[in-house]
Amino acid sequence: MKSKKVLSLLLACAVTVSMGTTVFASTEDQIAAAQAQKQEALAGLAQAQANISGLESKKQELESYLAELNSQYNELTDSISQLSIEAAEKEEELKNVKAQLEVAKQNAQDQYEAMKIRIQYMYEHGGSTMLEMLLSSDNLSDFMNQANNVATISTYDRNMLKKYEETQEAIKTQETQVEEESASIGNLLTEKSSKQQEVQNLVASTSDNINSYVNQISASQEEADALMAQVNNADSSISQLMEQAEAERAAAELWTLAKSAEEKSAAESEKIREAAREEMDSLRSHAEDRLEEAADRIVERIVNG
């Protein structure tokens, strides 16, 4: 198939080769143009590939960053979940402490009321001034301050009042501690939730940036594919044009050889014709001389006869 194509090119070139080197020069110009187009496409392809490489590198960096963000988000989610559990536990603990405090207050109040009854009984038959002072107390603390000055209060009652008072103080201290711990957990929970929202926003923006790079890489890859197609087309054109140029050179050489042979044949024919003319002239001259000699002999015979 290829030999037939080359033969066709040779025949075509042989027909047009008499036009000189115009066809051959035109083919060479086309080859040069195709090579220039190929170099331009290769330069563009190199730039596109460099762009793709840079975009891929940035995308990979963002993907690593996104993985870190997702890890942080998961850790924060776990931490928030644990803090929520702790907050609920502290809320329950605070509820229990408050209940205990109410019980302690009620116990102290009951003990206070019982003491008032006993003291009233003790002083019904005397010491009305002291009784009025005790009964006029506004609260437990006021009563204790006055009770400390009353020597007749039983040791048991004083100890029980002191015990209930200490119990209330201890529970209040515990209540304060639980409230502080609950507030600390609440603050930490708020902080973690805020940080989680921040990380979530970063995850969203980073994902958007990655998608942007993916789109840019896709566009650059399409450009690179198109440029590679141009390079391949240029290679194909250059190959065909070089084949055509080779056929044109072969045709030109063939035409030159044919013309040279034709000129040589014409020159040799002329030499043969010239030699033939010279031979004819020589024969003609020799024949004329012999005829002249024969005529002379005849005339001589006639004269002598």
Image (cartoon, rainbow, N blue to C red):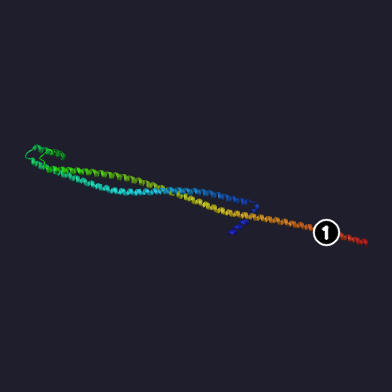
**Image location (x, y in percent) of residue 158:** 13, 42
> What residue sits 60% from the left and 57% below the top?
6
> What residue sits 21% from the left and 46% below the top?
97
Left or right: 230, with 63 as reference point = right
**Image location (x, y in percent) of residue 135:** 12, 39
Q: Nearer the viewer, residue 58 or 242?
A: 58
Residue 112 appears anywhere in the view: no
> What residue sits 87% from the left and 60% below the top?
293
Q: Amino acid at mark 1?
A: His
Q: Secondary structure at mark 1?
A: helix
Q: Quadrant of residue 164?
A: top left
- Determine the residue located farthest toward the left in the rendered image: 125
Left or right: 164, with 275 as reference point = left
User: In this figure, which residue is indicated by the disc labeled 1?
Assistant: 286
Q: Nearer the viewer, residue 273 or 50?
A: 50
Whether residue 295 is situated above or below residue 210 in the rendered picture: below
Residue 39 appears anywhere in the view: yes
- Determine the residue located farthest toward the bottom in the rendered image: 305
Whether residue 117 is situated above or below residue 28 in the rendered picture: above
Left or right: 153, with 49 as reference point = left
Left or right: 227, with 250 as reference point = left
Numbered marks: total? 1
